[in-house]
Image: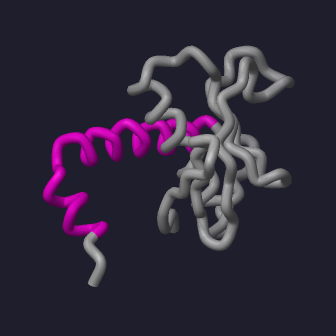
Amino acid sequence: MVSKQHFNKGNLMKINIDPVIYDVQYVDNPNYDEDEIFGYIDTENNVIKIKKGLDNTRKKIILLHEVFHGMLLKCGLNLKEEDDDMFEQIIECLSHSTLSLINHNPELIKFLTKKE
């Protein structure tokens, strides 16, 4: 579960996917093995890499996409290679839908983030 995001002195975002805190970095090429990747979660180094130069909406979708990867991996959900396309489609759908949910439901966000 993503519990909260942090900002350090350089305004670089940190995201807590319990218990791991990931640094978010904006880079020219998030995954050196593939050119057409816009984001990548590096679970070995606790880094989420987002391609530089994307518009803000696309950055948010890509960030959510990588966070969902981290959450599902944390839960032990590792799919076989033949299931990878379906896995990516599900994560892409969740990323777009979650951003839309956040943008169109400010009262829900207030309720979910309210300290008790």
Question: Was residue 86 drawn as part of the magenta stretch in this picture?
Answer: yes
Where is residue 92? Give x, y as percent: 48, 37
- Quarter of the picture holding the C terminus: bottom left
Question: Which quarter of the picture shows residue 93?
Answer: top left
Where is residue 74? Give x, y as percent: 66, 66
Specify start and end residues of the magenta stretch as a single range. 85-113
Question: Which quarter of the picture shows residue 114?
Answer: bottom left
Residue 83 visible, this angle: no
Question: Which quarter of the picture shows residue 50?
Answer: top right
Question: Was residue 95 drawn as part of the magenta stretch in this picture?
Answer: yes
Depth check, front residue: 87 or 16: 16
Residue 61 visible, this angle: yes
Q: Which residue is at 79% across, 21% downward?
A: 34
Answer with left or right where residue 4 lies relative to residue 71. Answer: left
Residue most extreme to the bottom: 116
Does 73 sit above or below residue 91?
Answer: below
Where is residue 25? Give x, y as percent: 68, 36
Depth check, front residue: 35 or 14: 14
Q: Which residue is at 24% across, 41% downward?
A: 103
Where is residue 72? Give x, y as percent: 60, 60
Q: Which residue is at 51% across, 68% downward?
A: 1
